[in-house]
Image: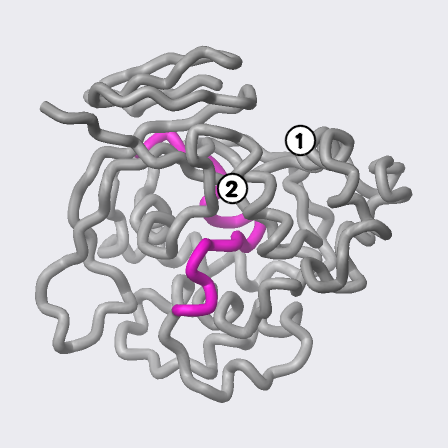
Protein backbone atom coordinates (compact mmCIF):
# COMPACT_ATOMS: atom_id res chain seq x y z
CA UNK A 1 0.00 0.00 0.00
CA UNK A 2 1.26 3.44 -0.85
CA UNK A 3 0.31 6.50 1.16
CA UNK A 4 0.72 9.68 -0.88
CA UNK A 5 0.26 13.20 0.35
CA UNK A 6 -0.42 16.39 -1.59
CA UNK A 7 2.28 19.07 -1.84
CA UNK A 8 3.42 20.73 1.41
CA UNK A 9 2.25 17.79 3.49
CA UNK A 10 4.34 15.02 5.02
CA UNK A 11 4.72 12.05 2.68
CA UNK A 12 4.75 8.50 4.00
CA UNK A 13 5.31 5.59 1.59
CA UNK A 14 4.39 2.06 2.58
CA UNK A 15 4.02 -0.88 0.15
CA UNK A 16 2.47 -4.35 0.32
CA UNK A 17 2.63 -5.91 3.78
CA UNK A 18 5.09 -3.38 5.21
CA UNK A 19 4.11 -1.69 8.44
CA UNK A 20 2.39 1.70 8.38
CA UNK A 21 4.02 3.92 11.00
CA UNK A 22 2.34 7.23 11.72
CA UNK A 23 2.93 9.24 14.88
CA UNK A 24 4.63 6.36 16.66
CA UNK A 25 1.90 3.78 16.06
CA UNK A 26 2.24 0.73 13.81
CA UNK A 27 -0.51 -0.92 11.74
CA UNK A 28 -0.34 -3.86 9.33
CA UNK A 29 -1.36 -3.17 5.75
CA UNK A 30 -2.95 -6.01 3.81
CA UNK A 31 -3.50 -4.68 0.29
CA UNK A 32 -1.72 -2.67 -2.37
CA UNK A 33 -3.64 0.56 -3.05
CA UNK A 34 -2.92 4.27 -3.21
CA UNK A 35 -3.97 6.37 -0.24
CA UNK A 36 -3.49 10.06 0.45
CA UNK A 37 -2.90 11.36 3.96
CA UNK A 38 -5.39 14.06 5.04
CA UNK A 39 -4.24 16.14 7.98
CA UNK A 40 -6.51 16.84 10.93
CA UNK A 41 -8.49 20.06 10.69
CA UNK A 42 -11.82 21.81 11.07
CA UNK A 43 -14.65 21.81 8.55
CA UNK A 44 -18.06 23.49 8.40
CA UNK A 45 -20.42 20.81 7.12
CA UNK A 46 -23.53 21.59 5.10
CA UNK A 47 -25.34 19.53 7.74
CA UNK A 48 -24.48 21.99 10.49
CA UNK A 49 -27.62 23.57 11.88
CA UNK A 50 -28.09 27.17 12.92
CA UNK A 51 -27.21 26.26 16.50
CA UNK A 52 -23.84 24.85 15.48
CA UNK A 53 -21.66 27.93 15.11
CA UNK A 54 -18.23 26.33 15.25
CA UNK A 55 -16.89 24.01 12.52
CA UNK A 56 -16.47 20.33 13.32
CA UNK A 57 -13.08 18.87 14.10
CA UNK A 58 -11.95 16.12 11.75
CA UNK A 59 -9.18 13.78 12.88
CA UNK A 60 -6.38 12.84 10.50
CA UNK A 61 -7.07 9.96 8.13
CA UNK A 62 -5.91 8.55 4.80
CA UNK A 63 -8.26 8.08 1.83
CA UNK A 64 -8.03 5.96 -1.30
CA UNK A 65 -7.22 8.15 -4.29
CA UNK A 66 -9.94 6.54 -6.44
CA UNK A 67 -13.12 4.53 -5.87
CA UNK A 68 -12.75 0.75 -5.69
CA UNK A 69 -12.86 -0.80 -9.18
CA UNK A 70 -14.57 -3.88 -10.56
CA UNK A 71 -11.19 -5.62 -10.80
CA UNK A 72 -10.34 -4.88 -7.18
CA UNK A 73 -13.73 -6.01 -5.94
CA UNK A 74 -13.51 -9.18 -8.06
CA UNK A 75 -10.18 -9.97 -6.40
CA UNK A 76 -11.86 -9.45 -3.02
CA UNK A 77 -14.73 -11.80 -3.99
CA UNK A 78 -12.28 -14.44 -5.20
CA UNK A 79 -10.51 -14.30 -1.83
CA UNK A 80 -13.81 -14.17 0.04
CA UNK A 81 -16.33 -16.29 -1.94
CA UNK A 82 -19.08 -15.77 0.62
CA UNK A 83 -19.37 -12.27 -0.89
CA UNK A 84 -20.02 -13.66 -4.39
CA UNK A 85 -23.38 -13.02 -6.03
CA UNK A 86 -25.65 -15.95 -5.28
CA UNK A 87 -23.81 -16.82 -2.08
CA UNK A 88 -24.11 -13.63 -0.09
CA UNK A 89 -26.97 -13.66 2.39
CA UNK A 90 -29.98 -11.43 1.68
CA UNK A 91 -29.32 -10.03 5.13
CA UNK A 92 -26.26 -8.34 3.62
CA UNK A 93 -27.25 -7.49 0.03
CA UNK A 94 -30.38 -7.19 -2.10
CA UNK A 95 -31.21 -9.20 -5.22
CA UNK A 96 -29.44 -6.72 -7.55
CA UNK A 97 -26.06 -7.17 -5.87
CA UNK A 98 -23.34 -7.28 -8.57
CA UNK A 99 -26.07 -8.04 -11.12
CA UNK A 100 -24.11 -6.29 -13.88
CA UNK A 101 -21.33 -8.90 -13.70
CA UNK A 102 -21.77 -11.71 -16.21
CA UNK A 103 -21.17 -14.43 -13.63
CA UNK A 104 -20.81 -14.36 -9.84
CA UNK A 105 -17.02 -14.39 -10.21
CA UNK A 106 -16.56 -13.12 -13.76
CA UNK A 107 -16.97 -9.53 -14.96
CA UNK A 108 -17.93 -10.50 -18.51
CA UNK A 109 -18.42 -7.93 -21.27
CA UNK A 110 -20.72 -5.47 -19.46
CA UNK A 111 -18.44 -4.58 -16.54
CA UNK A 112 -14.94 -3.28 -17.23
CA UNK A 113 -11.99 -3.87 -14.93
CA UNK A 114 -11.14 -0.22 -14.27
CA UNK A 115 -14.67 1.08 -13.90
CA UNK A 116 -15.76 1.79 -10.32
CA UNK A 117 -17.60 -1.15 -8.86
CA UNK A 118 -21.29 -0.45 -8.27
CA UNK A 119 -24.29 -2.55 -7.23
CA UNK A 120 -22.61 -3.17 -3.88
CA UNK A 121 -24.31 -2.94 -0.52
CA UNK A 122 -23.04 -1.03 2.50
CA UNK A 123 -22.22 -4.36 4.16
CA UNK A 124 -20.14 -5.50 1.18
CA UNK A 125 -18.34 -2.18 0.91
CA UNK A 126 -17.51 -2.19 4.62
CA UNK A 127 -16.23 -5.79 4.37
CA UNK A 128 -13.91 -4.81 1.51
CA UNK A 129 -12.52 -1.85 3.45
CA UNK A 130 -11.92 -3.97 6.52
CA UNK A 131 -10.01 -6.41 4.30
CA UNK A 132 -7.68 -3.55 3.34
CA UNK A 133 -6.16 -3.86 6.79
CA UNK A 134 -4.76 -1.07 9.00
CA UNK A 135 -8.23 -0.36 10.38
CA UNK A 136 -9.73 0.23 6.93
CA UNK A 137 -13.36 1.34 6.84
CA UNK A 138 -15.78 3.46 4.88
CA UNK A 139 -15.31 7.20 5.38
CA UNK A 140 -17.64 9.12 7.64
CA UNK A 141 -19.85 11.69 5.93
CA UNK A 142 -17.79 14.51 7.43
CA UNK A 143 -14.55 13.01 6.11
CA UNK A 144 -16.04 12.51 2.65
CA UNK A 145 -17.64 15.96 2.54
CA UNK A 146 -14.42 17.66 3.59
CA UNK A 147 -12.37 16.04 0.81
CA UNK A 148 -15.18 16.57 -1.71
CA UNK A 149 -15.16 20.31 -1.02
CA UNK A 150 -11.78 20.69 -2.74
CA UNK A 151 -11.12 21.67 -6.34
CA UNK A 152 -7.79 21.26 -8.11
CA UNK A 153 -6.20 24.22 -6.30
CA UNK A 154 -8.12 24.82 -3.05
CA UNK A 155 -9.06 22.51 -0.21
CA UNK A 156 -12.38 24.34 0.15
CA UNK A 157 -13.79 25.63 -3.14
CA UNK A 158 -17.43 25.77 -2.10
CA UNK A 159 -17.59 29.55 -2.49
CA UNK A 160 -16.54 29.30 -6.15
CA UNK A 161 -19.67 29.51 -8.36
CA UNK A 162 -17.85 28.05 -11.39
CA UNK A 163 -16.84 24.98 -9.40
CA UNK A 164 -20.37 24.52 -8.07
CA UNK A 165 -21.79 24.81 -11.59
CA UNK A 166 -19.37 22.17 -12.86
CA UNK A 167 -20.48 19.72 -10.18
CA UNK A 168 -24.15 20.42 -10.80
CA UNK A 169 -23.71 19.72 -14.51
CA UNK A 170 -23.10 16.07 -13.65
CA UNK A 171 -26.63 15.81 -12.29
CA UNK A 172 -27.95 16.59 -15.76
CA UNK A 173 -26.17 13.59 -17.27
CA UNK A 174 -28.44 10.71 -18.23
CA UNK A 175 -28.20 7.81 -15.79
CA UNK A 176 -27.86 5.34 -18.69
CA UNK A 177 -24.42 6.66 -19.65
CA UNK A 178 -21.72 3.99 -19.34
CA UNK A 179 -19.43 4.65 -16.41
CA UNK A 180 -15.93 5.88 -17.22
CA UNK A 181 -12.83 4.34 -15.71
CA UNK A 182 -11.52 5.72 -12.43
CA UNK A 183 -8.74 8.29 -12.56
CA UNK A 184 -8.28 11.73 -14.08
CA UNK A 185 -7.57 15.09 -12.49
CA UNK A 186 -6.96 15.08 -8.76
CA UNK A 187 -8.21 17.71 -6.34
CA UNK A 188 -6.03 19.72 -3.98
CA UNK A 189 -5.74 16.74 -1.63
CA UNK A 190 -4.59 14.42 -4.44
CA UNK A 191 -7.96 12.58 -4.50
CA UNK A 192 -9.74 11.72 -7.75
CA UNK A 193 -13.38 11.19 -8.78
CA UNK A 194 -15.07 12.76 -5.77
CA UNK A 195 -17.61 14.19 -8.22
CA UNK A 196 -18.82 13.33 -11.69
CA UNK A 197 -18.43 9.55 -11.70
CA UNK A 198 -20.50 7.73 -9.07
CA UNK A 199 -22.25 8.15 -5.74
CA UNK A 200 -20.38 6.72 -2.75
CA UNK A 201 -21.33 4.94 0.44
CA UNK A 202 -20.29 6.53 3.73
CA UNK A 203 -20.08 4.77 7.07
CA UNK A 204 -22.80 6.83 8.78
CA UNK A 205 -25.18 7.11 5.79
CA UNK A 206 -28.22 6.32 7.94
CA UNK A 207 -27.47 9.10 10.44
CA UNK A 208 -27.64 12.01 8.00
CA UNK A 209 -30.27 14.63 8.72
CA UNK A 210 -33.01 14.75 6.07
CA UNK A 211 -36.76 15.09 5.97
CA UNK A 212 -38.54 11.99 7.24
CA UNK A 213 -40.43 11.36 4.00
CA UNK A 214 -37.20 10.84 2.06
CA UNK A 215 -37.18 7.26 3.28
CA UNK A 216 -40.42 6.44 1.47
CA UNK A 217 -39.41 7.54 -2.01
CA UNK A 218 -39.22 4.03 -3.51
CA UNK A 219 -36.48 3.08 -5.98
CA UNK A 220 -33.21 4.61 -4.71
CA UNK A 221 -31.96 4.96 -8.29
CA UNK A 222 -34.67 7.57 -8.88
CA UNK A 223 -33.34 9.61 -5.97
CA UNK A 224 -30.10 10.21 -7.84
CA UNK A 225 -31.68 13.15 -9.61
CA UNK A 226 -34.77 14.16 -7.65
CA UNK A 227 -34.12 13.10 -4.06
CA UNK A 228 -32.93 16.46 -2.83
CA UNK A 229 -36.49 17.73 -2.97
CA UNK A 230 -37.01 15.97 0.34
CA UNK A 231 -34.51 18.25 2.07
CA UNK A 232 -35.07 21.72 3.41
CA UNK A 233 -32.52 23.66 1.36
CA UNK A 234 -31.09 26.17 3.81
CA UNK A 235 -27.94 26.53 1.72
CA UNK A 236 -28.85 26.42 -1.96
CA UNK A 237 -25.20 26.84 -2.93
CA UNK A 238 -24.61 23.31 -1.61
CA UNK A 239 -27.48 21.78 -3.57
CA UNK A 240 -25.27 19.13 -5.18
CA UNK A 241 -24.05 17.92 -1.79
CA UNK A 242 -27.58 17.92 -0.42
CA UNK A 243 -28.64 15.67 -3.30
CA UNK A 244 -26.06 13.13 -2.18
CA UNK A 245 -27.38 13.34 1.36
CA UNK A 246 -30.91 12.69 0.11
CA UNK A 247 -29.83 9.62 -1.83
CA UNK A 248 -27.80 8.14 1.01
CA UNK A 249 -30.51 8.82 3.56
CA UNK A 250 -33.04 6.96 1.41
CA UNK A 251 -31.03 3.74 1.48
CA UNK A 252 -30.89 0.65 3.63
CA UNK A 253 -27.58 -1.09 4.22
CA UNK A 254 -28.58 -4.00 1.95
CA UNK A 255 -29.49 -1.74 -0.99
CA UNK A 256 -27.53 -1.52 -4.22
CA UNK A 257 -27.89 0.87 -7.16
CA UNK A 258 -26.26 1.00 -10.57
CA UNK A 259 -24.33 4.21 -9.80
CA UNK A 260 -23.43 3.68 -6.14
CA UNK A 261 -19.92 2.54 -5.24
CA UNK A 262 -17.40 3.35 -2.52
CA UNK A 263 -13.85 4.10 -1.46
CA UNK A 264 -12.08 3.35 1.82
CA UNK A 265 -10.21 5.30 4.45
CA UNK A 266 -7.62 4.33 7.04
CA UNK A 267 -7.40 6.11 10.39
CA UNK A 268 -4.09 7.82 11.05
CA UNK A 269 -3.18 6.70 14.52
CA UNK A 270 -1.21 8.96 16.82
CA UNK A 271 1.06 7.37 19.34
CA UNK A 272 2.22 8.81 22.66
CA UNK A 273 4.48 11.85 22.49
Name the one closer to the observer, 40 or 134: 134
Name the one closer to the observer, 95 or 8: 95
Q: Is residue 212 magenta?
A: no
Q: How is the image coloured?
A: one colour
Name the one closer to the observer, 205 or 70: 205
Name the outermost residue toward the front. Answer: 272
Q: Residues within 10 Å of mark 2 (few under 14, many from 20)?
A: many
What residue appears at the point 33 percent right and 65 percent down from the top-left corner?
238
What residue appears at the point 73 percent right and 48 percent down from the top-left corner?
178
Which residue is disc 2 drawn over?
A: 263
Please provide percent x and percent y for residue 74. Answer: 74, 34
24 relative to 265 in the view: left or right: left
Distance between the Cα atoms at labels 1 and 2?
Answer: 11 Å
146 relative to 228 in the view: left or right: left
Question: Helix, strand or loop at disc 1?
Answer: helix
Q: Residues within 10 Å of mark 1 (few under 14, many from 20)?
A: some
Please give the label number shown on residue 72.
1
Q: Is residue 119 above or below residue 47?
A: above
Q: Main secondary structure of the magenta part?
A: loop
Q: Is residue 202 above or below residue 193?
A: below
Amino acid sequence: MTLRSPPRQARVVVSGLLALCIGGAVSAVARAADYVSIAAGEFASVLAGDAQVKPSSVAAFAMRTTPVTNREFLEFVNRNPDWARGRVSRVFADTQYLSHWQLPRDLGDAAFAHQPVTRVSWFAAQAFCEAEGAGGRLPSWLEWERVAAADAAHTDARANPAWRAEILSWYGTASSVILANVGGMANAYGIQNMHGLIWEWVDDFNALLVAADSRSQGDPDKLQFCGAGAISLKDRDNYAVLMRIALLSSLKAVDTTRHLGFRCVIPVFKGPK
